[in-house]
Image (cartoon, grey):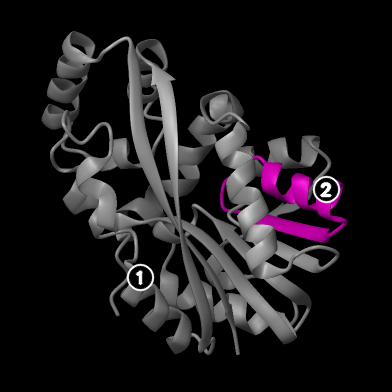
Amino acid sequence: MTPDVPSGAAAAPDGFDGRAERYEELRPLDANWWETFDALVRLGELRGLRVLEVGCGTGRLAHALEERERARVWAVDASPAMVARARALGVNARVARAEALPFKAGWFDAVVMRMALHLLDRPRALAQAERVIGPGGRVVIATEDPASFDHVWFTRYFPSVPAIDGARFPHVSGLRNELAAAGLPTIRIEELSQRRTISRERALDLIRSRAYSTFDLLPPAEYAEGLARAEAELPERLEYRFDWLLAAAAR
């Protein structure tokens, strides 16, 4: 399989360094965040385990696993700025790429990736995740379901989004195949659909700040035109659906 993110993956460290300062502000720990967290813990049976989070961002998932689930957690991210913020939260984080994890084989009970898979060279990253889990270990993933990309709230302003993100995020069948190819054939996948509401002001802030990596991949003219349309057309409150794919895979 050819990696589907050469441009996005190459840009990720710099792009996410620039997002680190406002990352928590733009992605608050709301009821939906905690619902996803609880689903990952249940599906991966993560409580009390020795866990590696790959693509940890500012460390909130790793921190919650330690505080709430009594897990012993290590974390890595390709962005030095993100790792610095994770460390400030008390997370045992270091700068490293998912495709070259600096840990011994079989060192962890579980590897967790939340909204990271689309930024990685997945065959290499999943092979590394499989390498570092021990007997009985599992790889636990939360990723957005591309089956609903036509209904993403900002697609109406940026029509290239379904094609751009459809090439980056795995569908259910693709995710199963990739996990199996990495040596993780025992796979359980669940779907989680959430309702979300944001204000016009926050929606515009997300676009203007390019809070999502998708915005970095849009043609400049489409981004400018879409922002202008959003400024003219967004309602005061926006309700939308967000669909997750949650997976737990083992040897």
Residue 122 figure quarter: bottom left
Q: Count neighbours of disc 1 (C-alpha within 10 A) and say few if under 14, some if 14 to 19, many if 20 or more.
A: some
Percent x, y of residue 221: 11, 28
* Image coordinates for residue 136, horizontal then vertical, percent: 73, 86
Disc 1 element: helix
Q: Which residues are magenta?
A: 57-79
Residue drawn at point x = 35 percent, y = 70 percent: 172
67 inside magenta stretch: yes
Amino acid at dot 2: Arg
Residue 57 position (above or below residue 142): above
Which quadrant is the C terminus positioned in?
Answer: bottom right
Alpha-carbon span between mark 1 and mark 2: 30 Å
Looking at the rendered image, the quarter that the N terminus falls into is bottom left
- Mark 1 belongs to which amino acid? Val
Towards the viewer: 33 or 96: 33
Residue 94, given in percent of the width and then of the height, sits at 72, 53
Point out which mark residue 172 bears: 1
Q: Which residue is mark 2?
A: 68
Q: Is residue 123 magenta?
A: no
Q: Tell me the residue at 30%/56% (across/down).
A: 146
Residue 112 seen in the figure: yes
User: In this rendering, is residue 106 above or below 129?
Assistant: below
Within 10 Å of disc 2 (Cα), the crowding (few <14, some 14-19, many 20+) is few
User: Residue sitting at 64 percent across and 50 percent down?
Assistant: 37
